[in-house]
Amino acid sequence: MKEEPAEICYNCKKNETNLRCQKCDELICYKCSISTPVGYRCTKCVSFNKLPMYKISNIKLIITLLCMMPISVLSGIISTILIPSMSYYNLISMIVCLVYGLVISQIIFYAINKIADNKRGKKLQCISLIAISMSLITRAYITNDFNIIINDINALIYAVTANLILWEKFK
């Protein structure tokens, strides 16, 4: 039995091949092909799209960011009222900070989730970090103490707790 003469790959125009794309039936060489569960496909036929839950428009991101600003400012005001600014460790205030970090992360998660239509991804992780940072800035402005790391351990505890939780939730 005589073998058919090989033809040239339509993608790279270099290699001879008899392999065809399973979907569009174009000639592709092994280097240009992508193995899928249904056979080899060309790069045009393989979808490299993101999952829908990770696709979010820029307008939706801006709306989410703008809607988070008042929530963040309110969070900073509440944290200033509930949590005293301390430069030393106190077990009770640390527990209050952890609980506040848990509560505020849930509130921010719920708000971002509703505004962004249950989307996930790095962009929303960054928006959640911005929200917590705005809360810290509001707290620092109200207390007139911008050296949070040294003078306000409590704020640092609730911010780190909230950021870690939100980062994981929006993965």
Image (tube, helix red, strand yellow):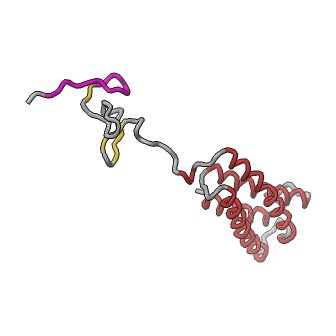
Point out the image quarter for the N terminus: top left
Residue 92 locus on image (x, y percent):
77, 77
Question: Relative to residue 3, is residue 98 depicted above or below?
Answer: below
Q: Nearer the viewer, residue 21 or 128?
A: 21
Identified at 78% across, 70% down, the residue is: 89
Q: Nearer the viewer, residue 87 or 144?
A: 144
First to last magenta residue range: 3-15
Total marks drawn? 0
Q: Nearer the viewer, residue 156 or 136?
A: 136
Judged left or right of residue 148, residue 142 is right
Based on the picture, tell me whether residue 14 belongs to the magenta stretch: yes
Question: Relative to residue 128, is residue 9 depicted above or below?
Answer: above
Judged left or right of residue 62, residue 34 is left
Identified at 77% across, 51% down, the residue is: 66
Point out the image quarter for the C terminus: bottom right
Which quarter of the picture shows residue 90?
bottom right
